[in-house]
Amino acid sequence: MAVFCRTIATKHMQASDVRPLPVLEETLNYLLNLLDATEHPFEVVHDFVFDRTRSIRQDLSMQNIINDQTIHMFEEMVKFHIISHHKLHSCSSKPSFSSVHYLNMEQLKKCLISLYALYKENRNSNSIYKNEPEFYSFHVLLHLGSNNQPLVDTCFRCLFEFIFFSISCCLVLVSEYVTISVLKGESLSLWLGRVPSLILKSKEMCFARRLLR
């Protein structure tokens, strides 16, 4: 992989150094496709993508681009950090990876804050974006057991009941699955087969099942 030497400092950057939105989109798609690469250890791929996605966010911020494409890009970058947090656990036996985990979580939280701001700035009415509840739920999950207060944005208050119920469904699904698998040896598919169709097709259950995947 190429050596990355772009600096986060923006003080001396020229306008010609900042990449336009189409280039940033193409770059992000290329980087995310690297996550499935097997010729390098994941921690190497993560470092490569980590620096470059941060640079993409920098370019978007400098141009103050606020639209649906930017929101989608931030959603994808949030997913990158979540997937990375999970995959880096397999490398956690190495002492140096405690700092990698910390930095990844730090950027995940920054990405989420920026994404929530984009949702708010780009909102045309009281409607919400399709993926907005899912990404607000990540804030809730990140602060479980924390004394920190949840977001108090008006939109978050509107979404909270849906988010709370969706996460509850997810946790119940996990709990039921564990109980059944331990006591009866049944699979999740058999348990789902007994759930009424009306519940399975509900937006809350669909969201909860998507979180489990």
Image: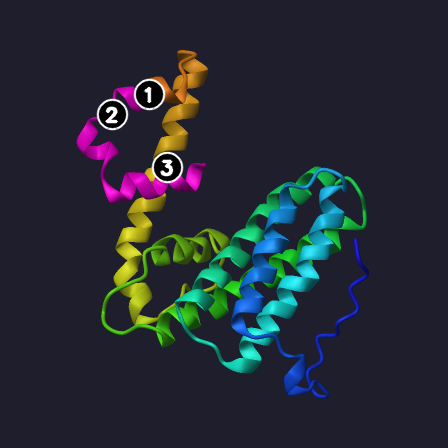
**Mark 3 neighbour density, 10 Å: few (under 14) some (14–19) many (20 or more):** some
Residue placed at 31% from the left, 40% from the top?
Answer: 206
**Residue at which label 1 appears:** 191
Total numbered badges shown on the rendered structure:
3
Type of the residue with mark 3: Arg
**Mark 2: few, some, or many residues within 10 Å (few <14, many ≥20)?**
few
* Residue wearing tag 2: 195
Horizontally, is 9 left or right of 199 in the view?
A: right
Which residue is depicted at the point 36% across and 70% down? 152
Among all residues in the image, which is located at the extreme left? Answer: 198
* Secondary structure at numbered mark 1: helix
Residue at the disc numbered 3: 209
Residues in magenta, as a range: 192-213
Q: How is the image coloured?
A: rainbow
Asked if the stretch drawn in magenta spans residue 9, the answer is no
Question: Marks 3/1: CA distance?
Answer: 13 Å
Q: Position of residue 33 (x, y in %)?
A: 60, 48
Query: Which residue type does callout 2 highlight?
Result: Val
Q: Nearer the viewer, residue 193 or 148?
A: 193
